Amino acid sequence: MKKVERLFLTVLFLTLTLMAQAQKKEISAAKLNIKNGTNLEAAEKSIRALLTDSTNRQNPKLWLLLQGAVKKQYDVGNEKLYLKQQYDTAQLFIIAKKMFDILESFDSIDVQPDEKGRVLPKYRKKHAEFLDPYRQNIYTGGSFFIRKQKFQDAYNMFETYLECANQPLFESYDYANQDPRMPEAAYWATYSGFKLNKPQLVFRYADLARKDTAHVEYLLQYMSEAYFALGDTARCISILQEGLQAFPTNSYFTPRLVDYYCNEKMFDEALNIVDEAIQNHEDNWIYRFAKSTIFLNTGRLEECIALCDELIETNENLTDAFHNAGMAYYQLAQNKWKEIDGDRQRREEVLDLYRRALAYLERYRSLAPEASAKWAMPLYTIYLNLNMGTEFDEMEKIVYQLSGE
């Protein structure tokens, strides 16, 4: 062997020896800290650093030591809470989740085949029995974070709770069939995903969440919003239709379906939904107003006016009812204008319709001065035809401002 090669091997041996000694020292220090309940976060950090080394990752002793460091942190925090000493409750739940993460990861090490190809997990039963009582804390932690509006933390908790059903570590517990709280946990995970504006998280547990019958009414709303965010109109409408069928008195589904059908000019469908909603909500003016809008859009102008007058009679400040009635009279005037053909009497009828429209639209303007895009042009036309010079001059300026000229 050449001198250079011998030197290289010597240096390599010394390096490996020093590294082994350093790791041994770290492990000893971590064990001591765990035993004494001191510097537990530092002990956890040092062990995690050792586990990043691929040669250490298969070492059960390091995994068990890491679990010991985290379990000790949990015990210390739990004792402080029990004694009503100052402690961050959220941290206790996060530590509990760490125990699941550690032992679930270690389980994949525990099931590695031995030299004869046999899979004989040594720790699975013991670790599953150890974690099972803490699983309720994971659920409680999720609820805690929802109350604090920390929805990412809440989602993480419920995800851990739910995924236990898919972890080989817990296969003997059969949580999917034996845990009655799984659907409710799925609902709260879905809710958290919705609050995070992450559609993929809304759908991840949605099928299971449907089994939580107490919350399906809200679940369907989150799903429709998620599909809308993804641009999947067909599925969004399908969910809205399902929601309306199952919960006809809920005020969420009807307006959105009506808006969709009106935008698609499917007015018959929109009118059917509104009529059904009116039957279920006799005192809700919103649906009757929606019906007046459908009447306005489909040329049933006299019916629109009659319905708006009924609404205004019950609430004289119902802004949009004045708009719809005014626009209905305005459209009637526009339609009759085409029939004048020099007929003086018909001209007077048109002017009378403009005067009727004027009363509603000026009231609408006073109630919604910021909505000039909706009242400026019809008032401009009305003032012109009624020869109202001063008002026309003012409106002309507003129209020009709106057009950008």
Image (cartoon, grey):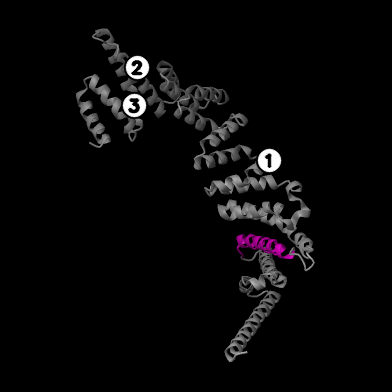
Mark 3 or mark 2, which is nearer the start of the sequence? Answer: 2
How many C-alpha atoms fall within 10 Å of the one at disc 3: few (<14), some, or many (≥20)? Answer: some
Answer with left or right where residue 33 lies relative to residue 279. right
User: Does the magenta segment cover residue 106?
Assistant: yes
Residues under labels 2 and 3: Cα distance? 19 Å
Quarter of the image for the N terminus: give it. Answer: bottom right
Q: Amino acid at mark 1?
A: Lys
The magenta stretch spans residue 209 = no
In the foreground, 34 or 315: 34
Q: Secondary structure at mark 2?
A: helix
Report, in whole angstroms, how far the alpha carbon at label 2 lies from the one at label 1: 53 Å
Return the residue found at the far bottom.
3
User: For the residues carrying marks 2 and 3, which lies nearer the camera in this image?
Assistant: 2
The count of marks equals: 3
- The secondary structure type at the circle numbered 3 is helix
Q: Which secondary structure lies at badge 1?
A: loop
Left or right: 126 with respect to 370?
right
Residue at the front extreme, as displayed = 1
Q: Which residue is mark 3?
A: 363
Q: Residue at x 70, y 52 (%)?
A: 166
Q: Position of residue 241 (x, y in %)?
A: 57, 31
- Give the image quarter of residue 57: bottom right
Which of the 4 quarters of the picture holds residue 132? bottom right
User: What residue type is disc 3 on?
Assistant: Arg
**Amino acid at pointer 2:** Leu
Q: Which residue is mark 1?
A: 211
User: Would you identify the image quadrant in which residue 74 lies?
Assistant: bottom right
- The percent position of residue 341, horizontal first and vertical second, equals 25, 10
As drawn, the label of residue 332 is 2
Q: Is residue 317 visible?
A: no
The residue carrying pointer 2 sits among few (fewer than 14), some (14 to 19) or many (20 or more) residues within 10 Å by Cα, namely some
**Which portion, as a residue range, is magenta?**
87-110
